[in-house]
Image (spheres, rainbow, N blue to C red):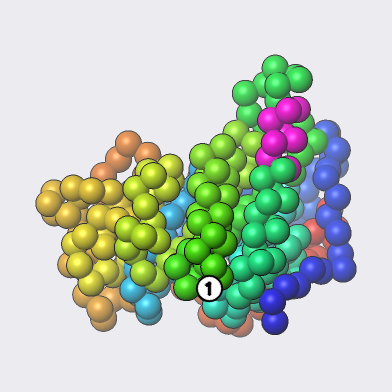
Amino acid sequence: MSSFKPKQVFPRRKPGATPAPKGALSIYDPAYLGLDTRGHAVTVPLMYRNILLGGEPGSGKSVALGNIVSHAALSIDVDLVLIDGKLVELLPYAPIAKQFVGNHITIALRVLRELQAEMDRRYLHLAQTGRKKITDQDGFRATLLAIDELAYFTVTVGTPQQQDEFKTLVRDLVARGRAAGIIVVAATQRPSADIVPTSLRDLFSYRLAFRCTTDSSSDIILGTGWAKEGYSAKDISPDTIGIGLLLAEGGIPRRIKTAFLTDHHVTRLVRRAVHLRRAA
């Protein structure tokens, strides 16, 4: 399976739209990730932010990505654009996604180009209205772009030209998408410099590093120098799945335990999301 487009279409909402149905969330609300070492809830703002997740297979990266996508699924004021190199991780959310792309780089590039064109249209709107960023009063729906297995598209499949274009498009969306209401959440199992170059990593305002095999791999996600300061995902035990180091804007890495959603939880959540979006 390479591409999925749901029959249901969610039009751009009008300014001053009717209130959200009971139980619905908003993309402007912080997303719940889990608990810190003191048992306090850990939340991250999504709107006007971008998040990078990395770690070795089985460390909990995909679960954390699912937590973020789940919040967006229950938020009726955001469209989901999902690109999944492994196909199966984000597939359960396909029924509520505006666009779903599996392991097909040609289709992924087309979707990214369309999203880039939409971003340019939004900046034209901002220029015409004198605004600095898109808000819920502009009539534009927020968009959450989730990419699972970044390495699949940047170093594994396609031609070198396609891989370079994929990196360039993602970098542009991360760099300019925030004010346009486009949120990028990217995850990779192989934190290396060719997959997450410094020019791309430093654009992410939030970074979450799960278990890594080396200090340098941890620094590729969190930023150069954090391992020397004592903050290295290499020190996370392989037996503690879901433990990661969260780096927020201007802060220091914070050790957290991400919440866990079973497949059954996700199935029920998606059904609820479908109901909420239809009600809206």
| Magenta span dominant secondary structure | helix
How many numbered badges does the structure rendering display? Answer: 1
Q: Is residue 261 above or below residue 33?
A: below
Q: Is any part of residue 38 visible from this angle? A: no
Please name the residue shown 73% across and 28% down the image: 124
Please name the residue shown 83% across and 45% down the image: 12
User: What quarter of the picture does the N terminus occupy?
Assistant: bottom right
Q: Which residue is mark 1?
A: 157
Q: Position of residue 75 (x, y in %)?
A: 68, 54
Please name the residue shown 69% across and 30% down the image: 123
User: Image check: 182 left or right of 201?
Assistant: right
Q: Position of residue 96 (x, y in %)?
A: 75, 65
Q: Nearer the viewer, residue 173 or 37?
A: 173
Q: Nearer the viewer, residue 29 or 183?
A: 183
- Would residue 224 be counted in the magenta stretch? no
Q: Residues within 10 Å of mark 1 (few under 14, many from 20)?
A: some
Q: Nearer the viewer, residue 116 or 143?
A: 116
Q: Is residue 248 above or below residue 101?
A: above
- Secondary structure at badge 1 equals loop
Residue interval drawn in magenta? 118-125
Please name the residue shown 81% across and 69% down the image: 6
Q: Is residue 134 above or below residue 38?
A: above
| Amino acid found under the numbered disc labelled 1 | Val
Q: Is any part of residue 197 visible from this angle? A: yes
Q: Quadrant of residue 82?
A: bottom right
Q: Is residue 169 above or below residue 105?
A: above
Q: Residue furthest top?
A: 130
- Would residue 119 be counted in the magenta stretch? yes
Q: Quadrant of residue 142?
A: top right
Q: Position of residue 215 (x, y in %)?
A: 19, 62
Q: Position of residue 242 (x, y in %)?
A: 36, 71
